[in-house]
Image (spheres, helix red, strand yellow):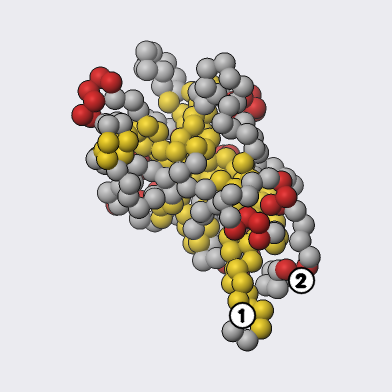
Amino acid sequence: MCGRYATTTNPATLAVELDALDEATPGTSSDKGFNPNYNVAPTNQVLTVVERHDRDHPEDPATLRIRAMRWGLIPPWSKASEPGIPAKGKPLFNARADKAATTASFRDAVKKRRCLVPMDGWYEWVTESEGPGKAVKQPFFMSRADGGRLYMAGLWSVWRDRSLGDDAKPLLSCTILTTDAVGDLTKIHDRMPLPMPREHWAAWLDPDHPAPEELLETPGAEAVSDILIRPVPSLVNSVRNNGPELLAEVDEKAGQISLI
């Protein structure tokens, strides 16, 4: 699974890098709400990459767009708990890639609302023994060895409180697809977020055609061969902690699991 990750980009920078439209920066406020986040948790606002047609000119080619979404997909048919507020339910921040196409909450998104979720890396926890009857959960951070950005496959949805009629505002939300872990990542967890290589972006983001089924399959170990796995401070265990210190080097004894 992927329940925490880190991202230090902002929508303006991402838009320039990808030659995309920045639809995430609110008004003229420079990246308000999208400061570096070293402890992204479900229900946080996150950045996504989508490819969509212009609403006023649907005949024009689709373009890449950077959008802000709630992490935790809200199915379009969800009811409202109060005007404009969706009812609370199970936080759908992950979706199994092998089952998403047949799962009610995700199957519509698989057909026409696929996205990329950019991140610096993600966290997982490994339970380690500290002696008889003592165990601790050691956090690990998975990132590209060269420091580059990762792009994970995701799905997104649009929710509106239909009872509000024309006053209903759209709420965008997303989920990160997961698959069986491969390579050295199997020593950390049996699941991992599904990476989406750049050469498959066009097919994955295409709003006019379904994605090839093979893009939802578990990739080979080569897909994560450049992933660096390292132990990080237990500060990340609390969502109240958020800063570069979460990615600091820790004493070698902190990570007892063998990754060799």
Disc 1 element: strand
Residue 176 at x, y percent in the picture: 47, 47
Residue 172 at x, y percent in the picture: 40, 33
Task: Pick the quarter of the image with the C terminus.
Answer: bottom right
Q: Which of pointers 1 and 2 lies earlier in the amino acid sequence?
A: 1
Instruction: Name which residue lies at 24% across and 25% down.
Output: 164
Instruction: Name which residue lies at 35% across and 28% down.
Output: 170
Q: Between marks 1 and 2, how big is the CA–CA gap?
A: 16 Å
Q: Nearer the viewer, mark 1 or mark 2?
A: 1
Disc 1: CA contacts within 10 A as few (<14), some (14-19) or many (>=20): few
Instruction: Name which residue lies at 56% across and 58% down.
Output: 220
Q: Is residue 219 above or below residue 15?
A: below
Instruction: Name which residue lies at 73% across and 50% down.
Output: 245
Amino acid carrying label 2: it is Lys
Label 2 sits on residue: 253
Disc number placed over residue 134 in the picture, else none: 1
97 vs 235, nearest the viewer: 235
Amino acid carrying label 1: it is Lys
In the rendered image, is residue 76 in sight?
Answer: no
In the rendered image, is residue 247 in sight?
Answer: yes
Disc 2: CA contacts within 10 A as few (<14), some (14-19) or many (>=20): few
Residue 26 at x, y percent in the picture: 52, 22
18 vs 189, nearest the viewer: 189
Q: Is residue 55 above or below residue 248?
A: above
- Is residue 173 left or right of 168 when viewed as pictured? right
Disc 2 element: helix
Residue 138 at x, y percent in the picture: 64, 66
